[in-house]
Image: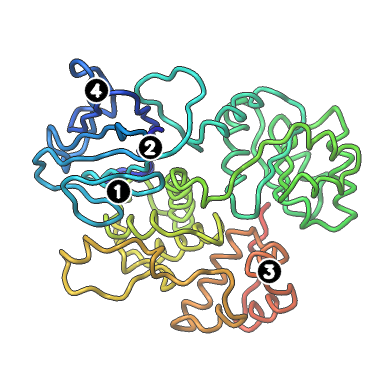
Amino acid sequence: MFLVLAFRTDHPLDPAYRIPLGDGTLVVGRGPEVLVFPAGPGRRQLSLPDLGVSRNHADLHLDPNGQRMAWVTDLGSTNGLFVDGQPTVHTELRPGQLLEIGSCFFVLVEGQLMGAEPGCVAFSSTTDPVLEHSIARYANDPEPIALVGEVGAGAQPIAEDLHTRRRASGPFVVYDGGDLPAMLRAAVGGTLFVRDIEALPMSEVRDVHAAVKSPAGPRIIVGAASRRALGVLGAAGTGLAQRAIYVPPLEKRRHDIGRLLSRALVAAVRHTGRDASTMRVTRTAARQLLGHDWPGGYAELAAACDLAVAAMTGDMLEADHLPTWLRKAPVASPEAAEQAAPASQTAPLMVDVPADFLLRLASPTERASTLRALLAVFGGNVSALARWVGRSRRQMHRWITAEAIDADSYRRA
């Protein structure tokens, strides 16, 4: 088992950190930087640069009876501990639960790290050991590869990480359909990411097939919902299936939601032309964002961030800025709000909902802004958006037309 520092409300754009939990006790306290160091026999110290963290705030250790959990104890801190939004002094911490210490949100992860690892490692796209190992394996490989995972698993951040680690001279270009030769020229020296091979018409699939087989041009990464879906590329798809990185769904990677949240917030703030580095998130808002199950995957997360950032008037993202499908009912006091349970217990899901869900949002303004945010997330790809919502492309076009939205203006260049 290991611990992940998944998100910091005072520095929401910071990387995530992975902290091994071995024998002995991990003491969490305030320090000058995120760092793990020996603190005596059987003890290690995790320092956090957070004024909301006491010098010796809490300690954690794995269950001595071999149960799949850890125990966390408050060491007399000023601001206390929260597990899944509930204050506690001493309690069990199970995989997937949110542990809150100051402005820092942690997730306990069940799994084995691949080999020896130093005390604290930072990650930009994923903290999943298997996924991280695959990224490192293929990062410098110029041959085409596939990212296989259900829609919404967050494949694009993985593709961008592969591109960045390769230190390619050219840009990272996303292809959702259209003029593939032009896109290939735009991506010369870099990476072309085909977001969803199944969303393309057969004429464009044939173009992708030719590009995958060509020894020249940018590196190509093909996204697909399954290895079987790669079959539309014929023999080239069979080869890609042998060189595929599996991206697990978000529900199995709760420890990565903080990384995807950071990415979505940056994109949302940039859309407004503001400076993302000054953004902060309240703890109540973070609890709802990190505690939600995100059944719609990264698209739902990105849409929520677009709507929340658009509602902000300053640099602080608050719970009231979140879209209605995430918000809980109002609570009695600010103190009670700070102890609110995660949204996953109460928020309606964005899939498996009535066909007119988008039309029945709280107001016409939010209805239109939700459609615009989703179109931005899907790059104007109405077919992909319709599949995610679970409705026909024709129905989606009717909703878009009713709000006088130009879907083509959202297509990514």
Q: CA distance from mark 1 to mark 3?
A: 33 Å
Q: Secondary structure at mark 2?
A: strand
Q: Earlier in the sequence, mark 2 or mark 1?
A: 2
Name the residue located 52 percent from the left edge and 31 percent from the top edge.
129
User: What residue did someone put label 2 on?
Assistant: 4
- Residue contact at pointers 2 and 1, CB within 8 angstroms: no
Direction from residue 28 to residue 180 in the image, left or right: right
Number of numbered discs overlaid on the protein picture:
4
Q: Which residue is mark 3?
A: 386
Sequence-earlier tag: 1 or 4:
1
Q: Disc 1 designates what residue?
A: 9
Q: Amino acid at mark 3?
A: Ala
Of the image marks 1 and 3, the number of the one nearer the N terminus: 1
Residue at image mark 4:
44
Of discs 2 and 1, which sits in the foreground?
A: 2
Q: CA distance from mark 2 to mark 1?
A: 15 Å
Question: In the rendered view, does 36 fall on the left or right side of 75?
Answer: right
Disc 4 to disc 3, C-alpha distance: 50 Å
Of labels 2 and 4, earlier in sequence is: 2
Q: How is the image coloured?
A: rainbow
Task: Point out residue 300 in the picture as x, y percentages from the top left corner.
Answer: 53, 61
Quarter holding the N terminus is top left
Quick one: SS at disc 4?
Answer: strand
